[in-house]
């Protein structure tokens, strides 16, 4: 496997902490066996949402704007603040804060995302999970008729003491994803038009 027994323990411990599961790895000899072990544990628990939008703009601009975490409050309507806490290579750790609720309460959490531009893919997860046992998000981008398709796949599970269950959160995420994707599409397409107009003027 390319790691010693201590390395394997560290890998399994990280997985257990991130996904709130317990793994019995006795006899595991290779990574495919680890994958199967993890998936067997998560399958009964994980809820899943999948939403996509096609943005009529160049890939470079779509990638640039949707991965500029510090400027997410200008792209998403739900975020009041985005603070980058740490960067290392293509991985960024950041804190997101929502707009205050009627009673003044502000929801906030830390997430981490790793970007792979060559693969047109981003893997993200909540570090501070709050009411979630875990929350993982996979962003993908691909060329499609009419522009660039951006797809979000979210897998999660609510804690037993969370105020809502998996089904309720699934409905909320699906509804909010559609709203945010429509807004992101509009803002990026407006930026693409402005950039194209500027290039024409420059000529």
Image: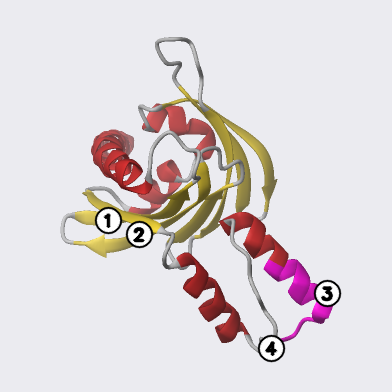
Question: Residue 159, how many percent across, how many down?
Answer: 50, 45
Q: Nearer the viewer, residue 122 or 30?
A: 30
Disc 4 from disc 1: Cα separation: 44 Å
* Residue on which the image places disc 2: 141
N-term-proximal mark, 3 vs 1: 3
SS at mark 4 in the image: loop
In the drawing, does residue 84 fall left or right of residue 99? Answer: right
N-term-proximal mark, 4 vs 1: 4
Disc 4 from disc 2: Cα separation: 38 Å
Q: Is residue 49 above or below residue 2?
A: above
Q: Residue at image x 44%, y 19%?
A: 99
* Residue on which the image places disc 1: 148
- Residue numbers of the magenta segment: 1-12
State the mark number for residue 27: 4
In the drawing, does residue 163 fall left or right of residue 33? Answer: left
Splitting the image into 4 quarters, where does residue 175 fall? top left
N-term-proximal mark, 4 vs 2: 4
SS at mark 3 in the image: helix
- Camera-side mark, 3 or 4: 4
Q: Quick one: label 2, few (<14), some, or many (20+) residues within 10 Å? A: many
Disc 3 from disc 4: Cα separation: 15 Å
Q: Residue at image x 45%, y 16%?
A: 100
Disc 3 from disc 1: Cα separation: 43 Å
Disc 2 from disc 1: Cα separation: 7 Å
Question: Residue 177, how many percent across, how many down?
Answer: 30, 42
Question: Residue 20, how many percent across, how many down?
Answer: 59, 56
Q: Quick one: label 3, few (<14), some, or many (20+) residues within 10 Å? A: few
Q: Nearer the viewer, residue 123 or 127?
A: 127
Q: Quadrant of the N terminus?
A: bottom right
Q: Quadrant of the C terminus?
A: top left
């Amino acid at each position: 496997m390319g790691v010693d027994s201590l390395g394997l323990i560290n890998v399994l411990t990280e997985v257990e902490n991130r996904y709130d599961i317990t793994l019995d790895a006795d006899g595991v000899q290779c990574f495919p066996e680890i994958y199967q072990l993890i998936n067997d544990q998560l399958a009964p628990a994980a809820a899943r949402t999948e939403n996509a939008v096609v943005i009529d703009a160049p890939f470079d601009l779509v990638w640039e704007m949707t991965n500029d975490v510090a400027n997410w409050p200008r792209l998403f309507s739900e975020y009041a603040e985005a603070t980058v806490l740490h960067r290392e290579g293509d991985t960024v750790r950041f804190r997101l804060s929502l707009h205050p609720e009627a009673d003044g309460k502000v929801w906030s959490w830390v997430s981490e995302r790793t970007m792979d531009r060559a693969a047109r893919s981003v893997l993200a997860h909540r570090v501070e999970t709050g009411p979630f046992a875990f929350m993982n998000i996979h962003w993908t981008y691909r060329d499609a008729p009419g522009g660039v398709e951006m797809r979000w796949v979210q897998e999660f599970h609510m804690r037993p003491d969370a105020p809502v269950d998996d089904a309720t959160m699934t409905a909320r995420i699906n509804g909010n994803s559609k709203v945010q994707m429509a807004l992101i599409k509009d803002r990026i397409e407006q930026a693409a038009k402005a950039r194209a107009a500027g290039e024409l003027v420059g000529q």
